[in-house]
Image (cartoon, rainbow, N blue to C red):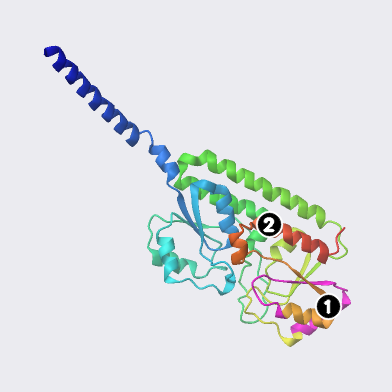
């Protein structure tokens, strides 16, 4: 009987030890794994930031775009539901006060003390905005920073730093993805430099707001836009007459128009000059269809290069 009792006691002790061991393994060992399973919640304002964060974080992050697909970025006004998104986020990424003047109030309204805010324009030498009329401030800086590939690398570094600070366990993962994406940006930059090196004209005429100053500056192009930084800055009749004369005098064959807005100004210019129209997408945002089809920032910039080569008559 004593032998049977001892065997039962040994079995119970072994069972208790096994349960304790399993509990310890579950609670202690998977701690890093649980961190891996818990995705970092990232909210971005504009599409380029959204795409950058997705490429760097991949399956470690859950990225949402504050700007609904198809909405023009400059006319966007946040809703109460956007405050809720930020309140539940780990990281919020925006480009600064010149593009998102409402961002600061939105962050304060959310009251998320643990929210990490990344201003993607930090460390970037911003260009002076082209003042179109007296409504626009003389101290307004051009917020379209993502249209210079060198700036994109700075933005990638800022997002990488933010992700590492929130999730240091996966530092190697984020660094590897950031480097891979930065290399893709560098390769695209080389393609642009080669393609735009020998063109019949270096003059980009844009029938929209002043969005491509950074791209023009980066690739030594002359850039003329019918409007100022804001799409609300309508050109005067005198502005249009002068622009039409310049198009005719310089024998410009193509007028570029912008995405997500009615190309009325570009249509006016082609009707008066006989030029043709081509899309040049500033990538603030994308259509709902493109968003659902996973069109990327790099896809947009590749398409822009195709149209620039046509419009500038490049070899």
Question: Measured from the top left, where is residue 296 in percent x and y?
Answer: 63, 56
* Front in this rendered view, residue 225 or 35: 35
Residue 167 lies left or right of residue 141; in this view the side is left
Tell me, for residue 150, which label it has, or none: none
Helix, strand or loop at label 2? It is helix
x 42%, y 56%: residue? 115
Q: Along the horizontal axis of the image, is 133 left or right of 242?
A: left
User: Residue 204 location, x and y as percent?
Assistant: 78, 68
Q: Give the position of the N terminus as an image quadrant.
A: top left
In-image side of 49 versus 207 (left or right): left
Q: Is residue 42 above or below residue 209?
A: above
Q: Residue at x 88, y 64 (%)?
A: 200
Residue for point 37% across, 57% down: 113
Rounded to the nearest angstrom, the CA distance separating label 1 from label 2 is 32 Å
* Image quarter in which the C terminus is found: bottom right
| Labelled disc at residue 246 | 1
**Nearer-N-terminus badge (1/2):** 1
Q: Is residue 264 visible?
A: yes
Asked if residue 220 can be seen in this view, the reply is no
- Where's residue 292, x and y in %? 58, 60
Q: Are marks 1 and 2 in contact (CB under 8 Å)?
A: no
Quarter assignment of residue 85: bottom left
Q: Residues within 10 Å of mark 1 (few under 14, many from 20)?
A: some
Which residue corresponds to mark 2? 299
Point out the frontmost of discs 1 and 2: 2
Please rate how many residues cluster around mark 2, counting C-alpha atoms within 10 Å: few if below 14, some from 14 to 19, many from 20.
few
Q: Where is residue 158 shown, x and y percent of the image?
A: 55, 51
SS at mark 1 in the image: helix
Q: Can residue 23 be found in the magenta stretch?
A: no
Instruction: Identify the magenta region.
Output: 239-264
């Amino acid at each position: 009987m004593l032998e049977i009792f001892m065997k039962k006691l040994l079995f119970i002790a072994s069972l208790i030890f096994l349960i304790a061991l399993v509990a310890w393994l579950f609670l202690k060992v998977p701690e890093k794994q649980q961190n891996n399973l818990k995705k970092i919640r990232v909210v971005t304002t504009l599409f380029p930031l959204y795409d950058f964060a997705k490429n760097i974080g991949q399956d470690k992050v859950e990225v949402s775009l504050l700007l609904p697909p198809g909405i023009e970025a400059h006319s966007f006004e946040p809703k109460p539901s956007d405050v809720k998104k930020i309140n539940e986020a780990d990281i919020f990424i925006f480009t600064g006060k010149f593009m998102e003047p409402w961002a600061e109030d939105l962050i304060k309204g959310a009251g998320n003390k643990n929210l990490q805010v990344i201003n993607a324009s930090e460390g970037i030498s911003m260009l002076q905005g082209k003042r179109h009329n007296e409504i626009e401030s003389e101290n307004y800086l051009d917020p379209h920073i993502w249209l210079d590939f060198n700036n994109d690398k700075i933005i990638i570094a800022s997002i990488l730093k933010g992700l590492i600070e929130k999730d240091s366990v996966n530092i190697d993962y984020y660094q590897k993805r950031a480097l891979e994406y930065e290399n893709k940006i560098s390769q695209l930059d080389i393609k642009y430099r080669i393609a735009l090196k020998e063109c019949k004209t270096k003059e980009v005429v844009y029938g929209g707001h002043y969005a491509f100053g950074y791209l023009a500056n980066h690739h030594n192009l002359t850039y003329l836009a019918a409007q100022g930084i804001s799409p609300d800055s309508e050109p005067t009749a005198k502005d249009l007459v002068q622009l039409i004369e310049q198009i005719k005098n310089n024998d410009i064959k193509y007028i570029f128009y912008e995405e997500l807005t009615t190309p009325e100004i570009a249509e006016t210019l082609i009707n008066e000059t006989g030029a043709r129209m081509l899309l040049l997408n500033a990538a603030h945002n994308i259509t709902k269809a493109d968003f659902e089809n996973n069109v990327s920032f790099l896809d947009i910039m590749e398409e822009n290069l195709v149209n620039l080569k046509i419009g500038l008559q490049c070899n």
